[in-house]
Image: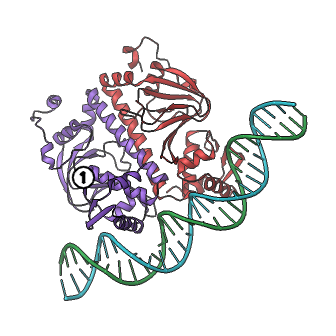
Chain colours: A red, B purple, C cyan, D green
Amino acid sequence: MDRLSSFSNISTRDREGNLGRPRVPTGSSFLREVVTMMGTTITFGRDDEVFGEGELADYVYLVVQGSVRNYKLLSDGRRQIASFALPGDVFGLDAVETYGFSAEAMQKSDIVVAKRSVILLIALRDGAFATELWQASGKALAKAQSRLLLLGRKNARERVAAFLMEMAERTGDDETINLPMSRLDIADYLGLTIETVSRTISCMEHDATIALPKRRRIEIGDTVALRRLNA
Amino acid sequence: MDRLSSFSNISTRDREGNLGRPRVPTGSSFLREVVTMMGTTITFGRDDEVFGEGELADYVYLVVQGSVRNYKLLSDGRRQIASFALPGDVFGLDAVETYGFSAEAMQKSDIVVAKRSVILLIALRDGAFATELWQASGKALAKAQSRLLLLGRKNARERVAAFLMEMAERTGDDETINLPMSRLDIADYLGLTIETVSRTISCMEHDATIALPKRRRIEIGDTVALRRLNA
DNA sequence: CGATCGCTTGATTCCGATCAACAGGAGTGG
DNA sequence: CCACTCCTGTTGATCGGAATCAAGCGATCG
């Protein structure tokens, strides 16, 4: 764990505790360590742009607190959210020359910003680290491919079920989900309209598949029913 | 170009000529060199499985001749093709533990098969090579994200237009496309049905946007009209 | 030459989009 | 504290684009 020592004098104590989350995202925590070490924390307000599609990709980002939407737009305003970045997630890492999508904070968010050139330098010197970056991209790609299946072939109910299971996995305690995003964000993530998302959620509430004590809080009642919709 | 010399005694002459293609896919040709050097060529017949989703990812692949579909299935048979691999393309590279999708030859295809462990070993020793792998994954991810936008937000005509432009770019001479895949493959790539693909293509023929002298050959008549549908 | 497979075309259905109205909650200012 | 407004989300009615169902065509191959 002191692989960083050749690049920095700062002690490499574990910083996971700072995140204050019940779960840590899968993947290299060493990558998070490097970004944290090499970067600066910036606070973004609600709907502030972190970067725009097509801009030179000079930085990589780590969400400490808050959440970020990564999305692409068509010229007429249609939007597709590619991914949500939650606390502990790194994003903007896979850009090659320029960012392939835009990124906006969904609420007041603390984000560590690190120079890509530094990451690249470390990667070039350290094959193991570069390999971790490669594998991190591989995992991101696998997720994207699952989403291709969702967007290309699943119906509304299946999409919402997949979303709920994903969010249950990534936040909360498997039973209760605290949504950091609006219904519109969910719709643009799932390739649906806000009305269809709302209706589908209502329907699942009537089914007792889920309960919603608050707008942005969903409790999963019937995990089996959700899982059955997932394959 | 002799970075391979430490791993092999075979001379590292340029092997691109072997591919017999008008265009070489973007990205590291060094990666193709490594795979070619370290691998063995195997010929697959039409619809032969190269690997199945969930299998241990022990190999990486390079298409020399022919073409491959990479796809995921739902339990009821719905299929989403994530990507097509054409001559010069490497696939199966981004898998982490197991393959995240299945791969089948679309016709008789010559494919170089190389052990992943060898690639990994080189990557661990050579930060520059590992960084190339990382960037290759980044490009694949960018393509996948563009396809998320297509599958989530574009209508049938826009999807087909995007497909034609992609194929014109990847094969042939920008004017004439020789399709290596069936209408069903196109449909499963674009998240449509075979009937909708057929109708849309017919409609574009009536428009004189395209011409189809043969079933598997498409000539682009109005590039501007196609491009207008793309953003 | 006939059979099969791949593709096209037509008729109808259906799921999700669109259009429209309203409800509830949070935040604001008096 | 309450009245007001704005914003987000829900619900209902209708529409439309692609799916589904169905039939026929044409090329390829044994």
Whether residue A180 is situated above or below residue A112 in the rendered picture: below
User: Residue A146: where, in percent of width, then height?
Assistant: 45, 49
- What residue did someone put label 1 on? B171
Chain letter behind tag 1: B
Residue in front for this viewpoint, A85 or D26: D26
User: Residue B134: where, in percent of width, then height?
Assistant: 33, 34
Which residue: 41% across, 49% down? B147
The quadrant the N terminus of chain B occupies is: top left
Q: Is residue B31 visible?
A: yes
Residue B136 position by quadrant:
top left
User: Residue B28: where, in percent of width, then height?
Assistant: 25, 37
Residue in front for this viewpoint, A166 or A225: A166
User: Residue B190: where, in percent of width, then height?
Assistant: 40, 57
Which residue: 25% across, 44% down? B25
Q: For the residue labelled by badge 1, is the local secondary structure a helix, a strand or a loop? A: loop
Whether residue A73 is situated above or below residue B105 in the rendered picture: above
Residue at the top extreme of this rendering: A9
- What is the crowding at mark 1: few (fewer than 14 residues within 10 Å), some, or many (at least 20)? many
Which residue: 50% across, 58% down? A154
Which residue: 31% across, 30% down? B131
How many numbered markers are drawn? 1
The type of residue carrying mark 1 is: Thr
Residue B204 position by quadrant:
bottom left
Whether residue B53 is situated above or below residue B94 in the rendered picture: below
Q: Is residue A146 visible?
A: no
